Amino acid sequence: MSWMSELVDLYDRNQNKAGKVTNVKRRGKNGETVLKPVFLLPINHVSNYVEIEIKLNLDGDFVGAEVINKEKTIMPVTIESAARTSGIRPRPVDDKFQYIARDYNQLQEVLEAKREPGEHKDKPYKQDGDFDEYLQQLTDFFEFTKEHSKTVAPLLMAIQKYVANNDLIIDLIHSGQFGELDSYEDIDEKSILANNPLCRFNVLTEGPVRWKDPECFKAWSDFYQFKLAKEGKTGFDYVAGNEHVPLGTNHPKGILPLASGAKLISSNDTQNFTFRGRFINSEEAVSIGYESSQKAHAMLKWLIDKQGFSIGGRYYITWGATGENLTTINPQGNELFNDILSLDDEIEDTNSAFASQLRNLLLKGASVNGIPKQNPVYVMQLEGTTTGRFGIVYYQALDLTTYIERITDWYTKLYLKCDDNKYIYPSLKFIADRIYGDRNDETTQKLKKDVVTDLVQSILGGRKISYSYLSKIFQKSIRPTSFDNQSAWKLTVTTAARLFKSYFSRGEIEPMLNTDFKDRSYLYGRLLAIADVVEQGVLGANSQDRSTNARRYMSAFSQRPADTWKVIYVNLQPYLTKSNYRQKAQRLFDEINEKFDVTDSQLNSPLDGKFLIGYSQQRTDWYKSSKSKSEVE
């Protein structure tokens, strides 16, 4: 229960934010940046899209109505009404017509008479005590606030007085907001009034509206906790460690955006195999306090909405002790990375110097954000297993100092000075895209989310990346002609080079080209890079847009490098003759060839990933030292 108690504690630390809207940046459907309003739900509340706002004055008189489009409203709920699917489960104040309109059945009778035979299926059903139960619950709530909340009581009195003594649907018909209507007979089946809309009440005062008023949130929470305790549904809360508290047996849903009906905790399936024959009821296994359940689920939803990241229905969240975004997935969203993303040529050229610089900047980011080094960091991944259930795929807690060390170690291993310097801190989603391509079909999305999950575990566990991913991206990298876009291919190659650098012992593989490194695969990669840039430079100078021989033979070169190099080198001669850099190229060829061990029986054996590291670093070094801009792609 550690993750749940941590969420409860986090809710308590952020309780002053409950009900307040925060706008967070999100990527829209077309890649644009959009602002998404998110808020931390008060306990015993949910947020829903309402369709109609009913306006009343403090005397309980109908003032008007308004159709609401795409606006979420915070509403008080009971345990039963928060997750209702059938039966009579009224909410305390804001609800659908079937509960709040005493003339609902009259409308349904008129609509039913207008339907053709056999057309009754899936139509809103009639009231059968729904309104009476709603009115009784609202009245009980109002009576409680008369003694415990003087500011909320007048609002509830106005609503209670109105719904008890007025026909809501008739008032809406005469409001003029729904067309030219005079009676129930004028309402069309397609009208919003005919489809049991969700409504909210707005009692017009000079104070804040009910669904944004902390006093209203607190009033319902106090009343409902009092009601639960009075009904005797109490026990031991294993999350908070408290005795004789109201227990939660029907836990919230709507936590995951793409699985709104899924629950994380469920124990009400008494007819099947929930208890596996070990317990008589759910409380014998574990009991969770209602308030603890509400806080934990509300906080989890807030974290997902505010800073969650999803791939193929799997959600990834990382947070600090006060809810700050410390994501492992994307450095641009991590609050510790404030200063790092602005670095460019200032970044050091050795592994040790880069690690020191990165570590210091992360610690500086923690200091700027007021995050103590000893504070914990929590990492969680969640995914829906069915339409009604979701589970925790991965969870880990570690202190901030250890977290910074693991992040520093990861990006230091990845760090290469390449053509694509803006990808020095690639997101894990970017890496997954390079391994499996940009397709977004269901199968590919599943593969990508598994990559991200495995990478998180590798980073935080200090383990090497799985070689299966390296093999996959290696095979993609050595086939440049299979890419429609050569820029995408270059990103794949440099990403592969970075991943292989993280896999192999750092040793002689530094961020910059190491001219003293005599590894066979590394040297072959350097040779291929020189051949590539020389031919590409000549082709570019002559406005020819085609693949070089180095790229066309790259796959064969990775398997039989010595044999294939003879073919590439012979084909390169006409371009060497025309190149302004033939002397530089030939000098480098000679220097590299001298480093090969000619007695090595493996000279023509397949190359490993250091081949891509040598290729990427040699290309970068060539352009860095070259004074000619015409040869830069």
Image: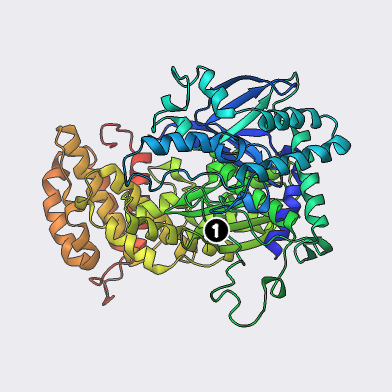
Q: Foreground: 362 or 272?
A: 272
User: In the figure, is residue 519 to the left or right of 454?
Assistant: left
Image quadrant occupied by the N terminus: bottom right
- Image quarter in which the C terminus is found: top left
Looking at the image, can residue 197 be seen?
no
Circle count: 1
Placement of 22 over or under 535, stated as above or below: above
Which of the pair 368/164 is nearer the observer?
Answer: 164
User: In the image, what residue occupies the spot 44% across and 19% down?
Assistant: 179
| Colour treatment of the image | rainbow
Crowding at label 1, few (<14), some or many (≥20) Cα neighbours within 10 Å? many
Which residue lies most toward the right here?
147
Query: Which residue was labeled with disc 1?
Result: 381
Q: Residue at x 75, y 32 (%)?
A: 156
Residue type highlighted by circle 1: Gln
Residue 280 pos. (x, y %)? 67, 78
Query: Is the residue 87 above or below the residue 422 in the image?
Result: below
SS class, disc 1: strand
Q: Position of residue 627 (x, y in %)?
A: 33, 33
Locate residue 302, reporting x and y percent.
Answer: 62, 45
Name the side, left or right, on which 577 lies relative to 201: left
Q: 536 or 132: nearer the eye?
A: 132
Measuring from the top left, give residue 580's x and y in whole percent: 21, 37
| Image-based side of 219 in relation to 298, left or right | right
The picture quadrant where one finds residue 503 is bottom left
**Residue 119 visible in this rendered orientation of the protein:** yes
Residue closest to the far bottom: 277
Viewer-proximal residue, 405 or 89? 89
